[in-house]
Image (tube, helix red, strand yellow):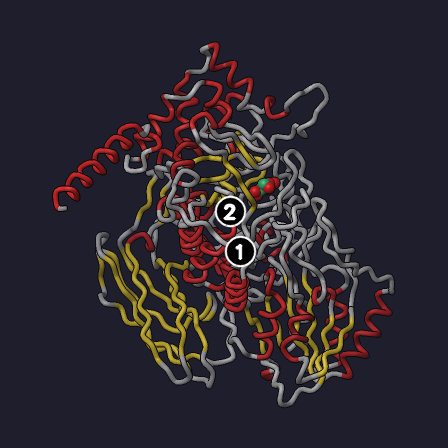
Amino acid sequence: MKLKIIMLAVMCIGVMHLSAQQLPVYLDETKPIEQRIEDALSRMTLEEKVAMCHAQSKFSSAGVSRLGIPENWMTDGPHGIRAEVFWDEWNQAGWTNDSCIAFPALTCLAATWSTDMSLLYGKVIGEEARYRNKNVLLGPGVNIYRTPLNGRNFEYMGEDPFLTSKMVVPYIHGVQANGVAACVKHFALNNQEIDRHTVNVNVDDRTLYEIYLPAFKAAVQEGQAWAIMGAYNKYKGEWACHNQYLLNDILRGEWGFDGVVVSDWGGVNNTMQSIYNGLDMEFGTWTDGLTDGISNAYDNYYLSKSFLKLLKSGEVKEEVVDKKVRNILRLAFRSTMNTKRPWGSFGTQEHALAGRKIAEEGIVLLQNKNNVLPIDLAEVKKVAVIGENAIKVMTVGGGSSSLKAKYEVSPLEGIKNRIGSQAEVIYARGYAGEKSGAQDGLGTGQDISDNRSEAELIVEAVKVAKEADVVIFVGGLNKNDGQDCEGNDRSSLGLPYGQDKVIAELAKANKNLVVVNISGNAVAMPWVNEVPAIMQVWYLGTEAGNAIASILVGDANPSGKLPFTFPVKLEDNGAHKLGEYPGNGEETYNEGIFVGYRWTEKEKIKPLFAFGHGLSYTTFSYGKVVADKKEMTVSDKISFTVNIKNTGNREGSEIVQLYISDLKSSVVRPVKELKGFQKVSLKPGEEKAVTIIIDKAALSFFDADKHDWVAESGDFEALIGASSSDIKAKTGFSLR
Ligand code: BGC
């Protein structure tokens, strides 16, 4: 018996050995990826290599079917998995099983200031992508919020490079744990939508490295992102999708990026640059797919037939295409050819609830005078909900992030769901914006056209407001063109559709007014002193209404903080004050590093609401900040500890922020800069010590002449705040 078992074992080992031997190296998952890449590459023809470097449909590119290397399938991103479109059209393919969970916009995620929420977000959206068999998620977006007019700010993570860097990393980890690449976009300097295809951005090196690059660098080095998308705009006269400086020198040269560079859709404009300047895969070039006389439009891409011709003639060396294909194969081995990756899941309740949790943590309570919020259901018997955004579908529209959501709870529905059995909920329209727009053949399924005049709508709203104990105005921007929408910027900071007038009238009609501003951008609030309570609510996706209602009644205690500054007026923003926005083909970032709070603090401008601001239904007290040393060296770390106590009677979370101020420097520096934060949850009466550790990176500026980061010795201050404008404690220290 024993002998039989031994013989069987020997046979098994023999068979295993044989099959391992027969398996080509590139298919052998026990072999290092780099070895597998070389093996696969050595088996490919020139035609197969070139085919991998460009799209074959709107969202896919070829694999090598002969070798069992699958196609690549991309999807937007970044707030949910885009519905299937036709092979060669933007229009919906009409599938009935592609309705996703719409997650909150990335502005909301940034407003949570919670790396746990970011990891959760990445995990659930990654699972949705994986289930739909996509191996590249086109997101997250980390372009810096330079102007409140940028139509795509809602897809990004705010104005601060440190906050954005910290928030992007867990998202990437969460996505990629599913064997799906996060494609971080748009690299780089895509900070406006006006003229996005043509504008040449002039920015000095210090500003580039201190403000616009850190989030991408963190995505590459800490997040280990497998893909990067180039931007539409130009930098140093070259389009960012094939840019020697951004892609070859910085991304690959300085940061050691080993993933794949994907063009933005139609972002490629030049054959030789697309060949030599760091691009690997070309997508969406504007050939319409069906231009007369062209049998296959994709053959006409810059990295298609003409590339092949240059390779065949020897004008371009084969090693040039090999370099690209290596990166594309690396993507395959990390995603589609990883047999151990999980299967994903789609449209689940678990995902919807994850979205709701993120939404609840990201809503920002901007103002709450007279404790109008939370709504006390023991006292309040009639609630008036007023405003178009209370009923408008928000997941459809906005450009490439538009979603076909499995369901979407509107604010009005959410409020009715939550309080309808305890109080009467009455509704009035208040104002009428544009009709709900369809996008890519996907309608909103609602007709909210209203032909009444502005005056009639206001009369009705005021009447309804007067009848109620509390009035909740739900307005803001929407996803229509010229609002928070790709392809265009906003034309002003003010709210559209005459909402300011409606709000002013409501404030006169009822003193218990709550304004719920839905937007991904700062808006002007000329009525700020007339309105007791204001909530900043982002595009929250599937569970929007339920999340809003739970904050309104206090089931969830608000704990979000602003990831960008709300200026009183446009001129309080550096890009606008210094006059170059939106540029005229050329655009110089004259404000330099002074973006957001760095600008308002330098100019001593009081913002409407400061970066990092956000209230809670409870209160917190801050103790003294204690450093573990008074003096540090460039190789040290230094820690700052502060005790935070919940002094109210509700459980709540506070976001403790650490800013560093350089007291004397050889260069002009911001008054202070965010260099650490921690979200801490506290029960009533509970106290916790929060410790934030920094090293010399937090003290450094980018020295353009040395082309390096420099921490100058001297005195610094560590400031602990509840926002950038609400500093609670500080301590000095020095760098030797
Ligand atoms: C956008 C990208 C998007 C791509 C594909 C482009 O217009 O700029 O962010 O991923 O389209 O839809």
Report if the beta carbon of the residue with label 2 is closer than 8 angstroms to ligand 1: yes
- Ligand 1, by image quadrant, is top right
Vertical placement of 248 versus 620: above or below? above
| Left or right: where 552 falls relative to 341 | right
The answer to whether residue 251 is seen in the rendering is no
Earlier residue among tags 1 and 2: 1
Hey, which residue is sitting farthest front in the picture? 1
Q: Quadrant of residue 105?
A: bottom right
Vertical placement of 305 versus 543: above or below? above
Residue corresponding to mark 1: 106
Hey, which residue is sitting farthest left in the picture? 3
Vertical placement of 251 versus 373: above or below? above
| Of residues 517 and 492, the one drawn nearer to the viewer in this rendering | 517
Vertical placement of 186 versus 53: above or below? below
| Of residues 135 and 524, the one drawn nearer to the viewer in this rendering | 135
Q: From the top left corner, tell me how far across and down residue 258 is, in percent.
A: 37, 36
The residue sitting at 48% across, 30% down in the picture is 63
Q: From the top left corner, tell me how far across and down residue 498 is, in percent.
A: 77, 63
Give the spatial CA distance, label 1 vs label 2.
Answer: 10 Å
Q: Quadrant of residue 501?
A: bottom right
Under mark 1, the amino acid is Leu
User: Dot 2: what SS?
Assistant: loop
User: Dot 1: what SS?
Assistant: helix
The residue sitting at 71% across, 18% down in the picture is 293
- Whether label 1 touches label 2, CB < 8 Å: yes
| Left or right: where 599 falls relative to 549 | left
Q: Quadrant of residue 510?
A: bottom right
Determine crowd level at label 1: few under 14, some 14-19, many 20+ residues with C-alpha closer than 10 A.
many
Residue corresponding to mark 2: 139
The answer to whether residue 514 is seen in the rendering is yes
Under mark 2, the amino acid is Gly
